Image (cartoon, rainbow, N blue to C red):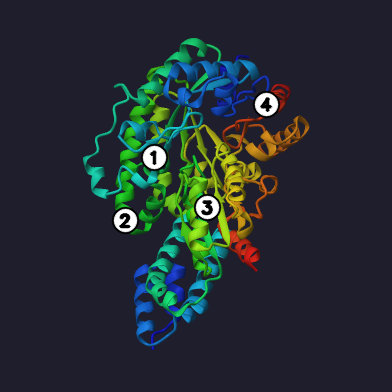
Amino acid sequence: MTGKERILARIEGRAPDCLPLMPITMMFAGDLAGIEYRGYASDHRMLAEAQLRVAERFGFDYVSAISDPAREASDLGAAVEWFDNQPPAINESRALIHDKGVLSGLAPPDPSVPGRMKDRVEGVRLLAERAGKDLVVEGWVEGPCAMAADLRGLNTLMLDFSDDGPFVEALFDYAVRMEIEFARAQVEAGATLMGVGDAAASLVGPRLYNQYVLPYEKRLIAEIRGMGVPVRLHICGNTRRIVKGMGETGSEIIDLDFLTPLAEARAAMRPEQVLLGNIDPVRALRDGTPESIEAALAECHAQAGEAYIVGAGCEVPRGTPIENMEAMARFARTRR
Amino acid sequence: MPELQKLYDAVLNGDQKTAVAVTQEALAAGVSPMELITNYMVPAMDKVGSLFECEEYFVPELLLSARAMKGSLELLRPLLAASGAEPAGRVVIGTVKGDLHDIGKNLVASMLEGAGFEVTDLGADVPAEKFIAAIEEKKANVVALSALLTVTMPAMRTTIEALKQAGVREKVKVMVGGAPVTQQFAEEIGADGYSDNASAAVGLARKLVA
């Protein structure tokens, strides 16, 4: 099987020849290719080169255009700080929607005009051209809560839930409309899977998640699936209290961070829901040994059951030893 | 005499308006600031911390309680300063250089403030020199360093090194935290303590200044 066939078989409930392998790599991929992260995040050719190299080196079943959460916010004019060799970051102290009134005058960004969103679209196109036959090509968008936090400021958004619910809904609606068009542009460029990252959602707890976040995640994911591609929902952090809702989003792959035991996710979701993850990226993967990694992944697999894809809880950290990644790859290739 | 239990409830429920109103009434009735802090606000924030730890409260609820507590504290601070009351400790806190993430740091700062510490929050992306200057200026006895990224964790080590070079390391206890930070890393870089959540950070700070 090719990597693409393997992932699609898993998603479609057919038996792949071995476990699919889909760890998130960004800085790790850049380092492996000798590319500084500023270049990785700003030039799709460098990102594609690094992704192709890391996928080839470890036999990943996919390549991804994920790089940082600031692409959409950058194109909207948010204050973004750049660093030479780590991801750009949004400066919350100068949040774009510091004043709620800004939202009503904010036109959604156009991913077809030059900017950081278009750069990702071109990255997807290049990856699809060079590897789309054999590997899944993953596009990436921000989820509603993450995108709202990027624009409003995470601290402020957390208070908005209590202070002004209708504003939060308007902001989430804006975020979802923007991300639908961003996803569409990536699908048209050749993405065969769409990642949705909604990191901030792990902070809000089940009441606010179910009331505010889940309906907008569902809408975004339904729209993307309507474009003919499956979805991978990734929420960083502790999602134990919202994991049931995550299983109701309609996302084909639920990608969990290490703080949520896969057994809890499995118990909260239907048996055929594909789970991805979720060894501790730092303590288990970077600081572990090939033997301990194999044991940790075996535990994940046992907890998740058959509908499982191998990965870490979040991004593979910079500095992860090569032999540790090889151990992860070996695990995937030798298990079903 | 105002019902002071309402202050406890207002902080616990994140009701800033009521917290401020009850504080004003209490002060007008001659209640001492320390009584309000010690008997109502600190217990309320302790309760918030335990609700957070057992996942009954989440970040929004914790921030609302912190806002209510701060609203009340703003009225009390000038009076405390005038009376010469000593805080539980003096903490300088910030996210280290190169890291713009601040919500974890903000939670810890709020919980420490709620526990009666005097907290100087330097914000995010803070260079070592700013920590050093604040330690001297505020006569801090605790420095709290936060990092969310594996790539900015090394700045914790360089900050501690800079404290040594500046001759202030022995004046302060250093505590570290943040998603990728581990106890092992804390020990490697010579920190005095590590906590993996905001509520436990309060216990750690209390222990460090004891």
Q: Chain of mark 1?
A: A
Q: CA distance from mark 1 to mark 2?
A: 17 Å
Numbered tag placed on residue B132 in the rendering: 3
The C terminus of chain A - image quarter? top right
**How many numbered marks does the figure carry?**
4
Mark 1 and mark 4, same subunit? yes
| Amino acid at dot 3 | Ile
Q: Which mark is residue A325?
A: 4
Disc 4 vs disc 3: which is toward the camera?
Answer: 3
Q: Secondary structure at mark 3?
A: helix
Quadrant containing the N terminus of chain A in the rendered view:
top right
Residues at circles 3 and 1 in contact by the CB criterion of under 8 Å: no
Q: Position of residue A121 (x, y in %)?
A: 39, 21
- Asked where in the image residue A332 lies, by quadrant, the reply is top right
- Residue behind mark 1: A147
| Disc number placed over residue B125 in the picture, else none | none
Q: Are marks 3 and 2 in contact (CB under 8 Å)?
A: no
Mark 1 surroundings: few (<14), some (14-19) or many (≥20) residues within 10 A: many
Q: Is disc 2 placed on a helix, strand or loop? A: loop
In the picture of the structure, the residue carrying the numbered disc 2 is: A164
